[in-house]
Amino acid sequence: MRAFFAPWMVGPNAEPTFLVWIVATLVKMIAVFTVYMVGVALLTLAERKISAWMQDRHGPNRVGKGWLQPVADGVKNFVKEETYPDAANLPLFILAPILSFVPALITWSVIPFAAPWGSVFGNIEMVLAPLPVGFLFILAISSLGVYGIVLAGWSSNNKYALLGGLRSSAQMISYEIAMGMSTIPVLLLAGNVSLSQIVNQQAFETWNVLNLTVAFLIFLVAAFAETNRLPFDLPEAESELITGYHTEYSSMKFSMFFIAEYANMVTASALMATLFFGGWDIPFTLWDNVAPHTALKTLLTLGCFATKTLFFVFLYMWIRWTLPRFRYDQLMSLGWKLMLPLALAYIVAVAATIVTLDALGFEHGSVPFHVGLVLLNTAAVVILFMIVDRGRLVSPAYSRLDRRDLEKLRAVSSPHRAQPVSQAGD
Amino acid sequence: MATKTRTVDVKLSTTGLDSRGRAQRVPLATDEAGNIVPLTAPPSLEPELEGEHMLLNLGPQHPATHGVLRLVLELDGETVVRCIPHIGYLHCGFEKMGEYRQYNQIIPWTDREDYLNSPGNNVAFSLGAERLFGIEITERCKVLRVIAMELSRIISHCVWLGTFCIDIGAFTPFLWIFQQRERVYTMLESWIGARLTTSLTRVGGMGADIPEGWTEDLANFVRTFPKVVAECDAMLTKNGIWVGRTIGLGAMSAEEAVNYGLSGPMLRASGVAFDVRKDFPYLDYETYDFDVPVGQAGDVYDRYLVRMEELRQSTRILEQALKRLPDGPVNVDDHRVILPPKSKATSDMESMIHHFKQVMEGPRPPVGESYVAVESPKGEKGYYMVSDGTSKPVRWRIRPPSFVNLSAIPRMVEGHLLSDVIAINASIDIVMGEIDR
């Protein structure tokens, strides 16, 4: 057996051969996909159980004491009737759930989920595709998610769905900018856009959440908006738009949107853990970051990564069952008037601090360098919470139209403005 | 004079068929001379943002219209330009049916009109009937009815708070407060045997006296309920999103509110301290110590604050009612209106006659009319009945507060966004059963 593998065995810290790399990638793909999908199914259960716990009730407890509820839901969704609205644009109607489902899965391919494993076949990276442009790839792919929702809203030929689609397109595009901007300080510190490098930098220096708290807060809010979860679930808003863009969907196509929502949630949580909480890094030790890369280290870091991710998933659920929903104009003004300028100002502040610290001769990663950053950060957080308190963050109903404007708008659609057309025989 | 046939030559931009070959409907209108003209596309206010208004049917089947209210909204983007409420989808004809029923038989209809406030309606109707009959009810009955009315206010406000939360997007307080509502329903069930449609009262008394140990249940409820209200208060009142979603929304000035005939929390939120319990007291409400919360801005947030405070004030009234609950008979000692006990009906000649007359004919009020208004959770609720001396009313009418309050909805929502329509509609606290009757 050992003789059979011998040609591919290259020692724990060497690069694996091409064949080993292919096999390892395939195995990782299957493993990640399986864990991800099963995890998402279990998250639907977790959401219901957690909400039940917060709301002082039992939650699902019938099918297999509740544990088999996701299976029952899945079977139900498969055997339910597929309905197609008469006036729907059928190709787009079918394409939309796929488009919203796939990007959520693809994003996962560049997130490093554990320390590399130094096997006898070489050093196997615990990430599906260690892309050098990892983070840019994520930004690119996550913008695709909006297409699924917009197309679903438009192709359903339903007014509520249309409004949901419109809301989500505006919302996701607005918050994507803030989200992208909020991560630039992270890249400035790491000096790289590869997620593995970002994790390494945090492991050897400090977690970014301490250095860049403001960026983390902006990213957190933007991630909530990107995933359409409360308090930003305006595209769905069941009390206003029935269920928004997926009003007309049934059975498995509806379920795809549902899975996509949870998949997006997990992905965003994993990103938060990776960008700001050290990814798979075990805190307060460098034992996991240096060779030899044993299987034990890989497993432990995987557990660490899962814990961080699940904490953010829990945060998602916690907030969903606590807060009410924003209104459309509040959402927009929060995104454009607060988060974007704040993110831009923060980029300037962090860049200036880094340049200054460099000029003063402090090395990247040295203790004084981080003390400087943390000081800036503390000041920024204090100012942020002093100035942007709740009264300013969410504007009350200033959006109401003036009475005169209303009359003008009404006149627009009044039938009396109809122009007579040419008449014959009179 | 020969009639001239007139043909209208309409130049169509399309073939008149849609993509599937079905005839397309062309909207037609008439000009000032009565000629038929097709509707042209409206010119845009902002030519660079060329667009058209969208008509949206909000309801009658919509999760947030609290029943079968239908609002036809003309939307410019998401801004409501025009709002036309349509009602009548739940018309049951309670008032007409009442003309063929004896007074006690109408009480079940009052359960079903404002079905979130059944005990309160029962009491209100009985008060009206008793004024017509000229009956003075017993002291114990008065206190029991106050308890019923305030419990009724609490369960109605519980539903309002829960649905209001859901409409604005907060789900959790809904379940917290509905648990309390269930507790009240369980108490009502042990009192009268029914939960939702209680039929708690009779003309001249109550359907049943409270069972043994019931006052302890109530005392327990009065003690623990404010804690849950405080929890919901902590979740919402100072929540930034909640405040931002409700302040300045659908504001009605005091003058406007009076002109629209609003009543109840809707009126008080606008700054008018009108409460039937204080201004036209019934059931000795003037002897209870409670405050009437009054708002300032008349917006959705003020309505929310007023109702939350009413929940607390109701528990205060319940506390006092519990303390003063006297012993003694519940029903008046007059077997012409109150059924004699069954055992006496089978053993005593006079009682048997009363029993027979009441079951076969029903109690007869003198000729006359009466109107009694009470402070229902939704506002001033009135029952008006006219008697011609027979055992059935000639006319029986309800003054439904929800109906009058709803009439202000176009004024309140026009100019706001679609999301605000839901919040404003929820803040009116309508019950379609009462509006359509």
Image: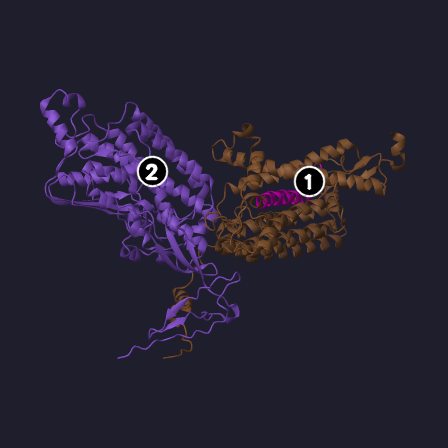
Chain colours: A brown, B purple
Badge 2 element = helix
Q: Are marks 2 and 1 on the same chain?
A: no
The disc at residue A23 is none
The N terminus of chain B appears in which quarter of the rendering? bottom left
Percent coordinates x, y for residue A358 in the rendering: 75, 53
- Asked if the residues shown at circle 2 and circle 1 are in contact, with their CB atoms under 8 angstroms apart, the answer is no
For disc 2, the chain is B
Percent coordinates x, y for residue B151 in the rendering: 31, 35
- Magenta: main secondary structure equals helix
Viewer-side residue, A251 vs B184 = A251
Taking the image as shown, residue A361 lies to the left or right of residue A413, namely right
Badge 1 element = helix
Residue A284 visible in this rendered orientation of the protein = no
Q: Quarter of the image holding residue B71? A: bottom left
Mark 1: give few (<14), some (14-19) or many (20+) Cα within 10 Å. Answer: some
* Magenta stretch in the rendered image: A256-282
Q: Residue at x 34, y 32 (%)?
A: B185
Figure check: B193 above or below B416: above
The residue at which mark 1 appears reads as: A33
Q: Is residue A381 magenta?
A: no
Q: Quarter of the image holding residue A120? A: top right
Q: Quarter of the image holding residue A6? A: top right
Figure check: A189 above or below A287: below
The disc at residue B154 is 2
Q: Residue at x 14, y 28 (%)?
A: B355
